[in-house]
Every structure is written in C-alpha cells, then in structure tokens.
Amino acid sequence: MAERSQHNPSSAGHWRLIALGGAISLAAAMFSVSGRASAQANTQASHFIQVATAANTIAEFTKIDNGATNNQPNDLLFVTPDYNPGELCGCIADRVPVGVDYDTSTDAWYIFNEDGSSMTAGTAFNVLVVPSASTTAFVWTATTSNSEGDSTFINSSATNGLPKAVLQVTQRFNGIEEDDPVGVWYEKDASEWAIFNEDAADIDTTGQDSFDVLVGATQSGGGKDLVQKATSANSLESWTVVNSAITNGDPNAFAIETPDWNPGGKGGTYTPWATGVFDETIGQLAVLIQNGETMAPKMAFNMLLYNS
C-alpha cells in the first residue's frame, strides 16, 4: 500500500431545494413545464453549452432544456465550467465544485453548485451527454468496501492495470451535496484508478456519493483525449494553455476536463480548487483555476477536446 501512503488521503450534506421524492419540488414550481413527453432513448453522445439565465436558474441550480437530456434519466453527464465560450465574455468563474442532478418532477437535468451558493446568471458550462452506461461509461458510488480516506477505488476492466487511461468524472447527486473538488489518481500497488477529494477530505461512504465516469474517448461522440500538464512554459497566473491542433485557432473549441493527480501513474500534484476552461486571446484553449489561485508546474488535467 506504499502508493496510498504516499498520497496520504486524509462534508457534510447541504439542504436540497429540489426534492427527489413524491412532493412537487421547488424547481417544478418555479420553472414552467408544459407536460412530459414520452422518453425516447438517445443513442449518440452529444455536447453543448449551458448558460445560466434568469429564466432557467434558481438558487444554486440551472435547469438544462435540451433534447439530449429532457426525459432522459439514464444519461451520464460530464460538466466543465467555461469562462468565455466562443470567446464571448460572460466571464464568470464558478469558483465552487459543481454536480448534476436529474429531477423526476420536471424530467430534466440540472447543474448545481455543490456548496449551495447561488448560481450566477451568465455562468456557462460545457456539457457532454453520454446516453447510456457501458463498459467505458458508468456511475460509480463510494462505499465502505471500495473507499479509503479521501478516495474511492474503481474496480473496472476499463481501468484496472491501465495507468495511461484518461478518465473524466462529474459528481452526480445521490442523496448528499459534496462541496469538495474532485480529481482522479492511479494507485500503482492495487493497479486501480481512484476518484478523490482534492482537498483531502474523507470521501462519503454511506452510498450517497456518486460520480459519472467516462474512460477514454470511444463513447464521447468524437472527442479526442489529451493529458494537459502545466509547466513554467505553458502556464501563466491561474491557467495553463493547451497547445493542440484540435483546438488551436478555433474560438468555438469545446473541452471537458478533470484534474489528474498522477497521469500515467507518475508524479503527484494536487489541484484543490474548482477548475474550468476558457479561450485565450491568443486563440488557444486554457485550463483555469476558477478562484485565481496560481497554476503550479506538474498540475495535470485529463481532457476531451472537440473542434467546431
């Protein structure tokens, strides 16, 4: 267990505005719903930008209204804040961890701030929708049997023994709100990938802490995976610039990212803050620490990149 010792993994739920049980939720009362269409399963992954507005936002939630997600409770969603999609400056950094939630009373998905803080109008998110679970796209739940300290260890044929796998992770509401920023790391002794709290808080093991997980690019609907490693040459202040032919010079480039503590099973650098992406004025995509903390060398990020 040497690697776990080296990593030294060291929350409480928040009151929900959206009820997941029989009572009509506050979201249902605030958002106009014209009726529930019959659910028709999507078969293709898709991606789009969600922008919080006065019309689709209440408290910490922004409601997604999209054909890929409406009436689709089995979707897996992967979300990354985008500071200025299309180089159009909404320029709002969501500085707290975000998660996703499906509300059965409105048959819609929501993105929400995990700490319960209000969602600011103009905040934008890149959203990747994978329509159904598979070997490389699945929901993982932390339990006492698969977790230790700040980490929950994934036992999957898609990841076991594969230190160069590229994982994307988004928190999914399953009973509690977790306001800890999450990342992934590879445990060499166990040959398993883990999801962990970047701030070293113990992970919840009551069966209420769940994550959507995507391995590689096969189920991404055309994305290309890449591991971005921050260096002194490609980083400035709170961001690291991605140099890729996929996205360079494309103001409408789209990206999903997840912090990776030790890509390839090597290294070990924490990113204990919420992260996102933005379009640099030099025509390149960048990964951004949302609260303005300095991007440190060897911080790393698993990415899925799309051009327009």
Image (spheres, rainbow, N blue to C red):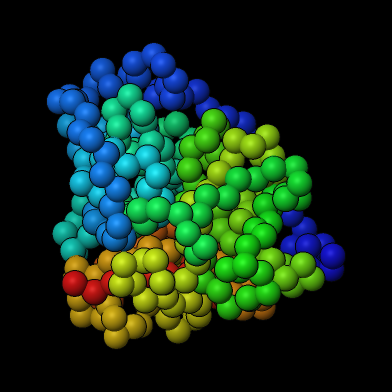
Classify 182 as above or below 214: above
**Is any atom of residue 55 visible in this view?**
yes
> On the picture, is 221 further left or further right than 260?
left
Depth check: give the residue in front, 305 or 76. Answer: 76
Question: Residue 13, located in which quarter of the rendered image?
Answer: top right
Image location of residue 231, percent across then percent down: 50, 80
Q: Answer with left or right where residue 277 lies relative to residue 7.
A: left
Q: Quadrant of residue 165?
A: bottom right
**Residue 252's x, y, as percent?**
19, 68
Figure disc tally: 0
Which quarter of the figure has residue 158?
Answer: bottom right
The C terminus: image quadrant:
bottom left
Which residue lies at the image location 21% right of the left edge and 40% below the top edge? 65
Picture residue at 84% right of the left edge, 68% below the top: 2
Residue located farthest toward the top when viewing the structure as drawn:
23
Does residue 214 lie above or below 208 as drawn?
Answer: below
Q: Residue at coordinates 76% horizontally, 50% vertically from top-left?
A: 148
The relative height of residue 53 versus residue 33 in the rendered view (above or below) is: below
- Left or right of 293? Residue 270 is right
Q: Quadrant of the N terminus?
A: bottom right
Where residue 33 appears, as percent x and y from the top left, is 19, 26
Residue 83 seen by the camera: no
Q: Nearer the viewer, residue 220 or 269?
A: 220
The picture places residue 147, in percent across and down from the top left corner, at 72, 49
Q: Residue at x 29, y 85 (%)?
A: 245
